Image (tube, grey):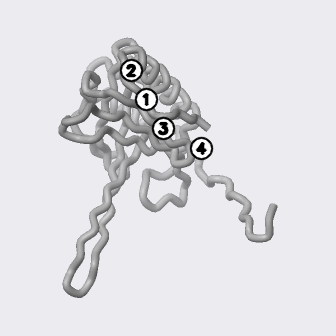
Amino acid sequence: MGLFSKKTKELEYDDSDCQRKKEIMRKMWNESVENGDSYEILYAGQTTSKFERGLVFDTNTTTFYHYIVGYRKSDWSVGMIQVDRELTQHTEPFFVEMDAVVGVSYHAKLQQAWLLYRKNYESYGEQFNMSDTGSKTVAGITNTVQPEERERFLDFLEELRSRLEQQGHKQEKWKRS
């Protein structure tokens, strides 16, 4: 260890609360989606930032979004429902138009995955921030530690990526760890 190196801290979280939240997310998903049990799910977040210059002050606004992401390999379906931070309310499901997806990307250091849409589509793609959160998390849903769920989702994305390559879509570099 160097002079200015810092030892990384272990993530502090409550395992029983984490399991309880996973059960709540499963229940919310199953309420929202027909045949919900046929999907694997995980928690993913998303942020957007908006910078505005003012006469006196410049402002930067960051908005945090929380999603339950469901995916199913049998028909290559990916859907999301937006939830509140307390996991008490959710929206109707939104399903990714998989015919528009031409790329899959993953940034291991940020634990961020992308489904990239074709050019001239209405948006760039879907972003999934899948990092674990501890009991002291300020922005995300606390106590969502999901290494197994993340690995299964990355397995799904790797298979989707190879499918897209077989269809002739050039893929960005993929580095899982």
Q: Identify the amino acid type marked 3.
A: Tyr
Q: Secondary structure at mark 4?
A: helix
User: Of circles 4 and 1, which is in front?
Assistant: 1
Residues at discs 4 and 1 in contact (Cβ within 8 Å): no
User: Mark 4 highlights which residue?
Assistant: 15
Residue located at (37% from left, 23% from top): 169
Answer few, some or many: residues within 10 Å of disc 2's Cα (few below 14, many 20 plus, some between 14 and 19): some
Residues at discs 2 and 1 in contact (Cβ within 8 Å): yes
Residue 147 located left or right of residue 42: right
User: Mark 3 highlights which residue?
Assistant: 106
User: Mark 1 highlights which residue?
Assistant: 171
Q: Quadrant of residue 176?
A: top right
Residue located at (43% from left, 54% from top): 140
Residue located at (28% from left, 29% from top): 31
Looking at the image, can residue 55 be seen? Answer: yes
Q: Which mark is residue 164?
A: 2
In the picture, the quarter occupied by the N terminus is bottom right
State the CA–CA distance, disc 4 to disc 3: 27 Å
Residues at discs 2 and 4 in contact (Cβ within 8 Å): no
Q: Identify the amino acid type marked 2.
A: Leu
Question: Where is residue 109 drawn, in percent x and y?
Answer: 56, 47
User: Of circles 2 and 4, which is in front?
Assistant: 2
Choose between 104 and 147: the one closer to the eye: 104
